[in-house]
Amino acid sequence: MEETHIREIPLANNLRVNIYNASRQLVGDRWLVRLIARMRIAVDDVWDGHAAEPFSKSAVKEVTGETLVFEQTKTRHFIDEAEKDDVFQSMLDDFTRHSITYLAHPEFGRRFILKRYNEAKQRQAWQQADAVGEIPREG
């Protein structure tokens, strides 16, 4: 899938959202219109290491890596070629109107990383339990 970078939006929390157009022709004059909003979040940039943090920065980086990617995709199917640019612009306006405030929250980056950390730890626990036969299997 080919993506065209449309714009970068700086946020109040010092993160940046990059907007991409990944639209493509389906058949004839019909298009799949796709907007991708992508944001790279470096652990070092958002994990301040206060004593109140549930995990150390190094523990988080060991599980999640140095940088995580938040991505949101909006897709519309079977759009007439004459309307594809307007539909994309409408999707971009909607994303800007409804998502930027959420993404710009001062705690967004830290909470996103903490969520991914917890998901990764849960996957590890399931894999370890499965390896020792503690997960019941149907069959």
Image (tube, rainbow, N blue to C red):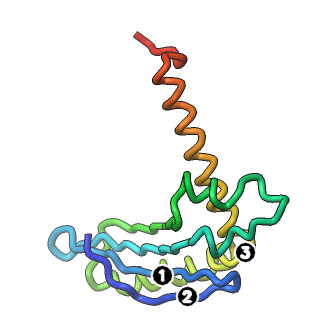
Residue sitting farthest toward the left: 28
Mark sitting earlier along the chain (1/3): 1
Which residue position holds label 2? 9
Which residue position holds label 3? 105
Tell me the quarter of the picture where residue 46 sits. Answer: bottom right
- Amino acid at dot 3: His
The residue located at (19%, 76%) in the rendering is 29
In the image, residue 65 lies at what x, y percent?
Answer: 51, 60
Quadrant of the image containing the C terminus: top left
* Left/right of residue 17 with respect to residue 76 in the rendered view: right
Which residue position holds label 1? 18
Residue sitting farthest toward the front: 58
The residue located at (58%, 46%) in the rendering is 119
The residue located at (59%, 39%) in the rendering is 122
In the image, residue 81 lies at what x, y percent?
Answer: 26, 81
* Left/right of residue 43 with respect to residue 35 in the rendered view: right
